[in-house]
Image: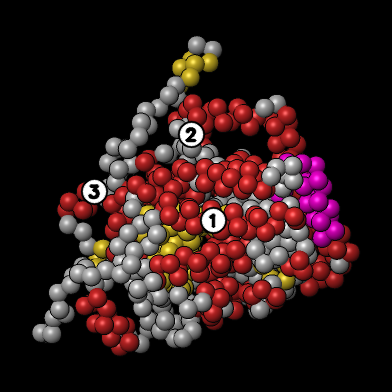
Amino acid sequence: MATSAKPAAVDDLDETQTRMLNQRVDETVAKAGTPPQFYRNTPHGKKPQPKQLSTTASAIVHYLATSFSNYAVSVLTAPQTLFHDPFGGMLALIEFPFVHIAMWIIWCFFVVAKACGGDKLWDWFSTQYGFGLSAVNMLDPELLYDTSVKQVHNTARKSLSNAYGLPLAPSQVKTFEYEQDEQVTPTRFFNLDIAKSLLILCALVYERDDKLVVEADKVARDETLDPTSRRRQVSKLLLRSTRTVRSRARQWGLNFASISDFINVGGPFCGMFYPASGDERWIVLAVKGTSPDSFSDILADAAISHQNADAFFGGGNVHEGFYASLAPSAEADNDPYANIIYGLKHLARTMRKGSGEKVNLWIAGHSLGSAIASLLHARLLFSPQDLGPDLVLRQGYVYGAPRVASADFISRFDFAASQPFGDTTRSLWRVIDRWDIVTHVPPGLADQEANQDILPETSMLNYGHFGIGVHLTGVTARNPAGWEIEQGSLRGGSRMQIVELEKDPLQELDSQPSGAADRDLTPKTMTILGYTFDPIKAAKSALQLVGPLYDHFPSNYWMRLGLVKADLEVRQSDDPPRTDA
């Protein structure tokens, strides 16, 4: 069977990125510019100066000053707010002081920890006991290193090239589409294999070394270095920062390329996973979530004021911190969304050479990354022409998403997601692990359609989720399937099924956790006051006592997805469709 031109290999793409970076650094040396992955389309010809929130006094002062101004407005308007929105008004008066005092305390903790060498201590602990992984993954390193993970990705790849996210052979597609057209109510398919694969990729992007990215930014601004030296150092640092991510992706037959940081350098960012070889045509855009040891990530989560989204989304309000991470303001000097679109188009053009098929784009994120990923999906749903001629938006899978938007925005999204009627190829699946606390913040009542008409647009309770909520309940006597649809989230006159590829016994065995890993994961112990224990196991046991917090970790989502029973198993076959009754 003839195959089309295969995508560039990982190292080839890195060389391409490096050449682009080198050229653009040369062009901006006079302006002391930053590495190209940090900005694009600088407005008004101003020198790029990405916002870099950190544990410095200026960051917390800026945050508190902005928040205090919002709080002052709430107080000044409290009489009328308490009249037409009593619960929202009271929440505004109580929530602002509580959140901001908490931010001040957390900032003090980070400053003291850094002054006492906390960064170096954490790096030592991670290397010595946590297998060199981030805080998100060190408790369950098997999620990235179990030998069964490769089979999980191999199974999902059979569906990622299909518009419906189903493992259909070419001979099966026309029959399936005919059956879909014959249905009065269209069916949306949640692919369990894809959900597992994308969750692992969301966990993997936490393993970028953000310190090297920050260092690269500093080098790029160092006017004392000659252009050649600066170019070489920046390129090397950026490639080293994603070495772990690219190495693991290669083990699974995937390539990875980082595209753009968001509001701050070295914080949330997104990257692209795509097949390393063959004729598959798909890209997974994965957005990194909140790192527990990153104060800047926590600041983005805590910016709970509403932000008018007319300019970027055409209507509604969204969470200020999430909006600022993605959409540029009039005063912004960097444009993360433009970086993302540029990177996607560049890769899609390379992948599509020699093939008439468009490249499928799948979007995924966890925690803060799920909020940004949801907004990305919404923007591309509203404005698909942004992707150009080589890409087409498919489905999104987000895990542990907080409430993001107002009722007006949610209604706009629901309308766009159901157009045209019967098109089920662009669903946004919002996966919720049991009692995950992040999925309940900020407080809001806009989830339910019945509340959306009565909530004032500026109410603090006018927050809700959008997308189809799939609640992972675990297997219970009441719910043996291990999942349920979130009430009120499946709108637009459709129904859903959870599907997976039908596997033979050997494939089923290969996709189960094997207990074997392709690196040494033997726990290491420490001794304190004569007591010897495994610090990682102790930390995990302590965290499990706080169920709603532990339920937010990717490893717990992985465990719950493993308990889900699919409604339908699809057999992939290249045999001609049967015509007999």
Quadrant position of the N terminus in the picture: bottom left
Element carrying mark 1:
helix
Checking the image for residue 132, the label placed there is 2
Magenta includes 56? yes
- The reply, left or right, for residue 335 in relation to residue 541 is right
Among the two numbered marks 3 and 2 on one chain, the one whose residue lies closer to the N terminus:
2
What amino acid type is highlighted by mark number 2?
Answer: Gly
- The reply, left or right, for residue 310 in relation to residue 401 is right
Magenta includes 522? no
Question: Is there CB contact under 8 Å for labels 1 and 3?
Answer: no
Question: Is there CB contact under 8 Å for labels 3 and 2?
Answer: no
Q: Which stretch did the figure color magenta?
A: 52-71
- The reply, left or right, for residue 8 in relation to residue 118 is left
Q: Is residue 296 visible?
A: no
Which residue is disc 1 drawn over? 19
Quadrant position of the C terminus in the picture: bottom left
Circle 1 or circle 3, nearest the eye: 1
Q: Residue at x 76, y 66 (%)?
A: 45
Q: Residue at x 56, y 31 (%)?
A: 123
The foreground one among 408 and 141 is 141
Which residue is disc 3 drawn over? 510
The foreground one among 485 and 10 is 10
Checking the image for residue 237, the label placed there is none
In this view, the residue farthest toward the right is 76
Q: Position of residue 328 (x, y in %)?
A: 70, 66
Q: Position of residue 528 (x, y in %)?
A: 53, 16
What amino acid type is highlighted by mark number 3?
Answer: Asp
In this view, the residue farthest toward the left is 580
